[in-house]
Amino acid sequence: MASDVDEADRNTRRPISDPNPPDLIGWPTKRLIALDALAPGLLARVLSAAPMSRHAIFAALSVRLPPSADDSDFALVLRSGKAREIVSYCRSEPPEGLLGAFARMGGQPLPRATYYDLLFDIFSDPDKRLQARALRHCGYISKLTLDALTSLESKWLLPGVLKRADNLMEVRDFQKSIDVLRSLPNPPTDETIERAILALGPKSKLSAVIVRLIRRAKSFPDHPLVRDEVFQPLVSASDLIRASRKYENCLRHRIMGPLTGRVAYAEYKDGIAVIELRRMSEDQGWLLVGIHGPRNEPVSVEIRREIREVCSGRGIPHIVENIEDLKWRSLLRMADSGGLYDWTV
């Protein structure tokens, strides 16, 4: 007598003629089931084959055969042929490197048939030799690997680059970041970028390359001050790092502001203070927003006034921080002591 489990299994089992069979292995499933009827054992081979043979079958299925082609012959080749024979039947002799790539692609098919066209094209086209080289050295190959491959300039497809990305956005950010750095007045050379990539540690991310290049930025976009006996503009990453050590402050962590042209720093009379300027909107020039002493200690009122006057004389205004008129200071003290700012009143 059949158990309840057997009965339930029988009731949910799909008939052989079901037009929508279960999606066992993605987009090739339906066609494989049809071809298995012509060459019994094909499905079993696909499910048990090593990655090279399995992806050779998927690559063959990605090709639209001419109407005159015999599906029976095709099914027999898929069931019994070697990986090279399968690819040759549908396309041409597999180019060097293609079958090796198949062997490093896991068990599931790539999500779209066009990815197999891309692989065949990369290993066939001499102009794509840098992409082919990157695939030979990247280890496991996935959809992300191929998407990354087409998102990077070929010159940055150095060994190890593709396997370091966690997602496609990271790869695109990497490429765009390099483009931005190369647009600077004194950009890093291709050799410098290549050395930074090759210097990556075993567990380093692509972002480490960008940080390394930022810290070696030789010049920022522009600076509102010129070097003279009063001001020494900090116009490069090394200038900021040097000043950070000299003043014992956090300037070395403030590189992105000057790099993007939003902020500018300069030393005032070597060792007295560092001034911070911010770019204003609508091309209205720059604004003095900070005066920082060594170790971020307060700068005297006299020095602050002196710096503001010098900057004003050079067309750089400042924010009014204190009330200079003594009578207004008296009023401010009385208002403060009288509870004007007490929220409970």
Image (spheres, helix red, strand yellow):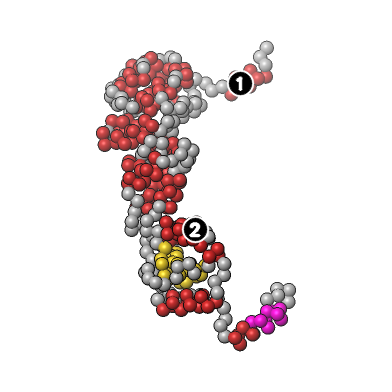
Name the residue nearer the viewer: 41 or 223.
Answer: 223
Q: Which amino acid does label 1 sit on?
A: Asp
**Residue 246 position within the rendered picture, expressed as x and y whole percent measured from the top left:** 49, 61
Residue that badge 2 annotates: 245
Residue at the image point whose x is 73% and y is 74% from the top: 344
Residue at the image point whose x is 41% and y is 66% from the top: 233
Residue at the image point whose x is 60% and y is 19% from the top: 10
Q: Nearer the viewer, mark 1 or mark 2?
A: 2
> Where, quadrant-wise, is the C terminus in this rendering?
bottom right
Helix or strand or loop: what does disc 1 sit on? helix
Closer to the chain start, of discs 1 and 2, is 1
Name the residue nearer the viewer: 152 or 278.
Answer: 278
Residue that badge 1 annotates: 9
Which contiguous range is marked in magenta?
A: 332-340
Considering only vertical position in the picture, is 216 above or below 147?
Answer: below
Q: Dividing the picture into quarters, in which one does residue 260 lie?
A: bottom left
